[in-house]
Image (cartoon, helix red, strand yellow):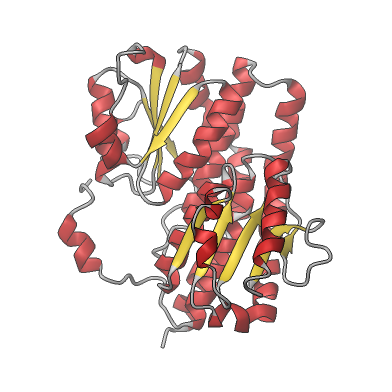
Amino acid sequence: MMNAEKRNVMLEEIRSEPGYFEECLKRREELTGDFVKLFTSHRFRRIYFSGSGSPSHAGLVLKYAAEKLLNIEATYSYPMLFNNHEGLNVGGKYKPEEMVVICPAESGRSKGAVITARAAKAQGIPVVCTTLNPEGVLARECDVVIVKPSGNELALPSTKGHSTGIFLLLLCLVETAKALNTIDVEMYRAYMEGFEGLIQSCGAAVERTLEWFEGHKRMVMNAPFYRVIGYGANYGTALETALKFIETHKRLTMAYELEEFMHGPIRTVNPGDCIFFLCAEDGPEKERMKKLYEVVRKMTDNCVLVCGDADGAENPMALTFPAVNREFLTAVEYLTPMQVLACEIGRHLGFDPTEGMNTWAKLAMEPSFSD
C-alpha cells in the first residue's frame, strides 16, 4: 500500500499550478524578455518546435499559436522523425537568420531535442528552450534559455512542469506579438486577462473535477477503455491526456482529433467505453463537438462533456468549471481536469505515481543524454 504522502503527491503538484502561473505573470518581463528580444532583432519566417513526450504535445499547441499570433510559418514534429526524415530548411528556402528552433523541455536531456538543437546551432540557426535545468545538455546548445519556475516533480508523470511550460511559452508569444504589432492593443489586453483568468479557472477545475469524480466514480473506474477527443490546439491536450492516463494508471487510452474520430474510430465504440469530449473555445468546431457528443451518447452512456459552466449547465454528466475559453489558453486550463482524472484513477487503482513500470526497458534504449 502507498503511504499517504506518495498517494497525494501528484494531486498536490497539480494543485500548485495556478501559483506558478501567477509567478510567471509577475515575472513576465524577466521570463519573456530574451525571447522577445530575439524575435524583434530577427525577421523570422519559420519556427521549428521540437520535443519528445509531453513537450511534443506542447509543440503542437504552440505551432498553431505561433502561426496565428506572429504570422510566421511553424511546424512541429517528433524529434527523431524530424532529425532522420525531415530536417531543417528543406529546399534551402530560408536563410539561417530567418529560422528559429524552439524546444519545450523538462530535464532537457532527451536526445531528439538535443540533436535538433545541435543541428540548428551548426547551421547558425538560433535555438530557444524552456527547461528545469539551466546548466543541462540542452541549455548549453541554446541562445535563449527560459527556466521554468515550477521546479522538479516528485511524481513521474509531468503535470505542473508541462502546464507551466505551455503557459510560459504562450506568454512569450503574446508578448512578442505585441512587440511586433501582429496583434492590436485590444487583443493583447484580452489575452492578458485570459492569462490572469487561468489562475482562478485552473484552481477551480481541480476541485470541481474531484467532486465530479466522486459522483461518477463507478462509471469511470468500470470503463474498459478511455478515449479523449479534442479540436484545434486542444488536439494536443487530448494527446497529453492519453499520455498522462497511461503513465498514471496504465489503462488503455486513445486520443483523437475531432474530425478524424469519424474516419474509423467511431465504428469501434462499445457500450461501457468512457469518452471525454473537450469542448473548449467557441466556433464551428465547438458546435461540431456538441453534435458528436449527442451522436455518441446513443452508443455508450459514458460520454463526458468537459466544458465551461455555461455549456454544461443542463447536463448532469458534464465535467464543468469556470473556463476562460480564450483560444490557445484553453490548452492549459482544459488539461487541468484531465490531469486530475489521471491522478484519481491511478490512486484508486493503488498505483504509486513516484514509481514507473518497465524503467529498465527505457534505460536499455538510452533515450537521453547525461548532463
Residue sitting nearer the eye, 11 or 364: 364
- Residue 63, image x and y in percent? 50, 34
Q: Is residue 108 left or right of residue 272?
A: left
Residue found at x 20% / y 48% = 370
- Residue 167, image x and y in percent? 56, 43
Please say whether residue 150 is visible from this viewpoint. Answer: no
Q: Is residue 234 left or right of residue 74?
A: right
Residue 14: image quadrant is: bottom right
Q: Is residue 137 left or right of residue 205?
A: left
Q: Is residue 305 left or right of residue 359?
A: right
Residue sitting nearer the eye, 292 or 202: 292
In the displayed orientation, state which residue is furthest to the left.
364
Please say if 41 is above or below 309: above
Residue sitting nearer the eye, 329 or 204: 329
Residue found at x 70% / y 80% = 215
Residue found at x 39% / y 46% = 132
Please say if 65 is above or below 371: above
Q: Quadrant of the N terminus?
A: bottom left
Residue 283: image quadrant is: top right
Residue 196: image quadrant is: top right
Please say whether residue 287 is visible from this viewpoint. Answer: yes
- Residue 178, image x and y in percent? 64, 21
Residue found at x 41% / y 46% = 55
Q: Quadrant of the C terminus?
A: top left
Number of numbered discs visible in the structure rendering:
0
- Residue 211, image x and y in percent? 70, 74
